[in-house]
Image (cartoon, rainbow, N blue to C red):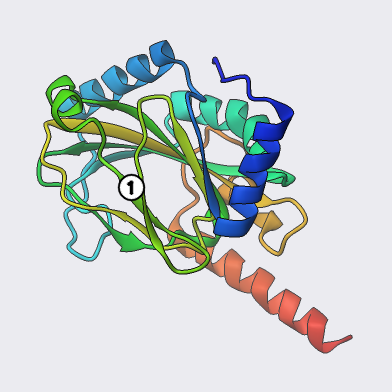
Amino acid sequence: MAVTELSLAQQKELQQQFLQQGFCVVPALLSTELSAFLAEYAVLKRATKPNIYRSRSDTLSQIHREYADPAMEVLLSRLHVWVELFTGMSLWPTLSFYYTYTNGNELKKHKDRECCEVVACACLGLDPEYQKSKQHWPIYVETLQGEAHPVCLNPGDVVLFKGSQLNHWREVFDGKWCVSAIFAYVDRQGENAFLKYDQRRALGHKHVGMLFWLLRLGWYRLRAWCGRLGR
């Protein structure tokens, strides 16, 4: 993996942006070659083994997605140190997803689960015709001040944002395909530190199931509440 070499002053500036607005953009964090490879990989997987939910209530309805794909889990691990650097936080990795958007798809306005306190959202690729004519398909992030901000990413760029705090969305896509991936983390010292690896034994394992996930979340919340009462 190749990353940009930013000066100490630029690193501090990104940390300040993240602290003050809830997001910051790291240009060319992934190399052009790696981004292109992963985009081609994701497009091929959609064509040969689509994984598409069709529920209207799903914020990602009609969009091919993969949870804990091995390639993305490796990248989740390798990005860890850089996400800590640019946010100034000590973090646990939790999960990875990649999405292959096609014509007519949109990402509905939402906030992420508790395991996505910090999200690194990477643009991996766009179909060449769309990129030539429109350059970007922005993701909108609502800042800590409540202002909607369009974030335009080139392949390899990454936006870091507070996924469980800030609303984010994309408008309807009118190109052929776009591949995006998210890599999520939680504060090591925070109330959601138990969500390390998204409650899995280790990175690379499949999801534990939402029932177990929610029950364990409720148990930790109850235990924390009882602890506060006992003080």
On the rendered image, what quadrant is the C terminus found in?
A: bottom right
Residue found at x 71% / y 33%: 9
- Asked whether residue 186 is in view, the answer is yes
**Residue 200, x across and y down, in percent:** 58, 45
Residue farthest along the bottom direction in this orientation: 229
Residue found at x 72% / y 44%: 88
**Residue 184, x across and y down, in percent:** 53, 45
Residue farthest along the front direction in this orientation: 9
On the rendered image, what quadrant is the N terminus found in?
A: top right
Mark 1 = which residue?
Answer: 139
Residue found at x 74% / y 45%: 90
**Residue 60, x across and y down, in percent:** 26, 52
The reply, left or right, for residue 157 in relation to residue 42 is right
Total numbered circles? 1
- Asked whether residue 201 is in view, the answer is no
Where residue 58 sits, quadrant-wise, is bottom left
Of residues 200 and 96, the one drawn nearer to the viewer in this rendering: 96
Q: Secondary structure at mark 1?
A: strand
The reply, left or right, for residue 80 in relation to residue 90 is left
Residue farthest along the right direction in this orientation: 231
Of residues 1 and 70, the one drawn nearer to the viewer in this rendering: 1
Where residue 202 sits, quadrant-wise, is top right
Q: Residues within 10 Å of mark 1 (few under 14, many from 20)?
A: some
Of residues 1 and 18, the one drawn nearer to the viewer in this rendering: 18
Residue found at x 49% / y 55%: 163
**Residue 62, x across and y down, in percent:** 17, 48
The reply, left or right, for residue 47 in relation to residue 217 is left
Amino acid at dot 1: Ile
The reply, left or right, for residue 125 in relation to residue 27 is left
